[in-house]
Amino acid sequence: MTFERSATTPFADDTVLSEAYIPNELRGRDNELNEVSEILQQIIDREEPFNSFIYGISGTGKTVSIKYKIQQLQKALSAYDDVHATFIYQNCESINSSYQAAIAIVNSFLRGSRDRPEDRITYDYLKNGLSTDKKALPTAGLPADRVYSLFFELLDLLTYKNTVYCSAVQNAVEKKSYPDLEDLTVTDIIGNKQSDSLQSILSNLHEQEGITPPSEVRDYVVVVLDEVDRIGTRDELLYEIPRSRANGRVDSVTPSVIGISNDIAYKESIKSKTDSSLRLKEITFKKYNVEELQEIITQRAELAFKSGAYDEAIIGFTAAIARKNGGDARYAIALLQKAGVKAKQLEDTVVTETHINLADEEKRRDRVYEVVEDLNEHEKLLLAAIVYHNIHNETPISRTDLYPTYNQFANQLLESANVSRRVADYLKEMSQLGLLTRENAYAGPGQSGFTYDIDRVDYELMIKILASANDRPGGLLPNKLKKAYERFINQQSRPQ
Ligand SMILES: Nc1ncnc2c1ncn2[C@@H]1O[C@H](COP(=O)(O)OP(=O)(O)OP(=O)(O)O)[C@@H](O)[C@H]1O
């Protein structure tokens, strides 16, 4: 097969549907954006910064709003030469301790600064200023104290003097070619070299060239810890960063922190730990309603698709689906992207509700797959038991009626079963994950209060996942369920 550009692609620019894209305007977040502005405004005003904790369920625009506001602040800061701010963004999704987060941040500077020319000076200076000559810190093995000292050393180095100023002086020296300063190094400029010629040039630069002297600039460092709940509740950077100046761990910069999380339990744990000295401001991002989702979808669809390549009806349709999924803007955008790909595969020139439906189905299947894969062995077998009863039209089913089937499956495949009380916890958890539906059906003393059911369309998927579970031959698919499923399929394919 040779490659040719598809004539039927509906996309004008699919990059606007990627997670990295930051829209020019954020819809439906006026209150939240105003609150974020309030914290960042302190920096423009050269005041003590607020620390903040941002909470909201998944897809409510927390990350994009922070990035958007930081971009705006950075632009605004160019008008003020007496403030300098460095923003560090760290996603903690795959990090499980403050220790690891500190290492990741130090390493992103050690590694990243070399790749970004504008940070070259920072890197040169870091090399001289950080008390390590490693190109990257190992992710294990260093004592925690050492890691945190390096982390705070790094924050303390991220000043105007070490970066913008240093590079302005170097440029000026190069332009004017001062022969006796040809071998000038970063460290010389920063002030360790007290030569008269350097000092007179510096004062000339301040007066004649309008380069602000470092003594007039206040330095801020804002550390954004996204998905901060992942780093757990011990030695938290979330508390250490705001206190680092008072504790003497830094003295050149004023650090602050923005923690972001969608974990309600973490939010509650923060509340109980914070005291007023932290100046920790909590901001809650509301779920999007259908109208707000429509605005977000319209904005993306207009940029992503060619004119006339989507049916207007998909806007409301997609918004309604996303609202049912917890008002999740990420889900809505992912549906647009998948629907566009579906239309292209089917060589349809217009993206319609049909493609959105196909995309939604595929995404739901992917989600079920992920959730089921993460269940423990006993939960998987409970699921197997419910599928078994569902095939026999015996659901909704109570825990009491379900238990013997689970017990049999678990004894056969795992050689032991959990007690009924534990099974109740599993069932509750699985309902919360959206795998099972749970109905209150109180049937009198001694009876289980709930009944459970599962969505019939997912049989094939469930069987597939169970059969490949836990890397064992035959997986966790009980024989009895396998046979019941095969009979069910045969009946379905028999002519009526
Ligand atoms: N108001 C908005 N306008 C435009 N796009 C938005 C808006 N809110 C969210 N999005 C988009 O939706 C997606 C998810 O947003 P974001 O990552 O900010 O959510 P989140 O609240 O941080 O979610 P999580 O808790 O899962 O990390 C991103 O692609 C983002 O650009």
Image (cartoon, rainbow, N blue to C red):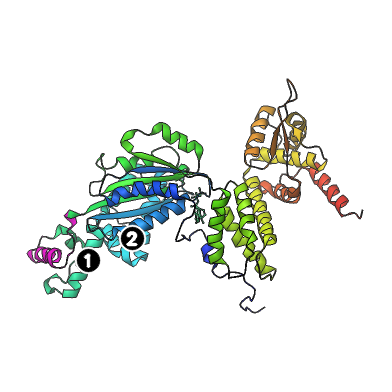
Is 210 magenta? The answer is yes
**Label 1, on which residue?**
168
412 lies above or below 209:
above
Residue at 71% across, 38% down: 382
Residue farthest toward the top in the current orientation of the protein: 445
Horizontal and vertical percent position of residue 186 = 21, 63
Horizontal and vertical percent position of residue 215 = 17, 54
SS at circle 2:
helix
Horizontal and vertical percent position of residue 11 = 58, 69
The reply to whether residue 136 is in sight is no
Q: Majority secondary structure of the magenta segment? A: helix
Residue at 63% across, 51% down: 320
Horizontally, residue 115 falls left or right of residue 302, namely left
**Label 2, on which residue?**
75
* Res 79 → quadrant: bottom left
Is 234 magenta? The answer is no
For label 1, count other residues whose C-alpha is less than 10 Å away and answer few (under 14), some (14-19) or many (20+): some
Residue at 65% across, 45% down: 372
Residue at disc 1, CB closer than 8 Å to ligand 1: no
SS at circle 1:
helix
Bounds of the magenta span?
A: 194-215
The label number, if any, that marks residue 42 in the structure image = none
Horizontal and vertical percent position of residue 399 = 73, 31
Q: CA distance from mark 1 to mark 2?
A: 19 Å
Q: Are marks 1 and 2 in contact (CB under 8 Å)?
A: no
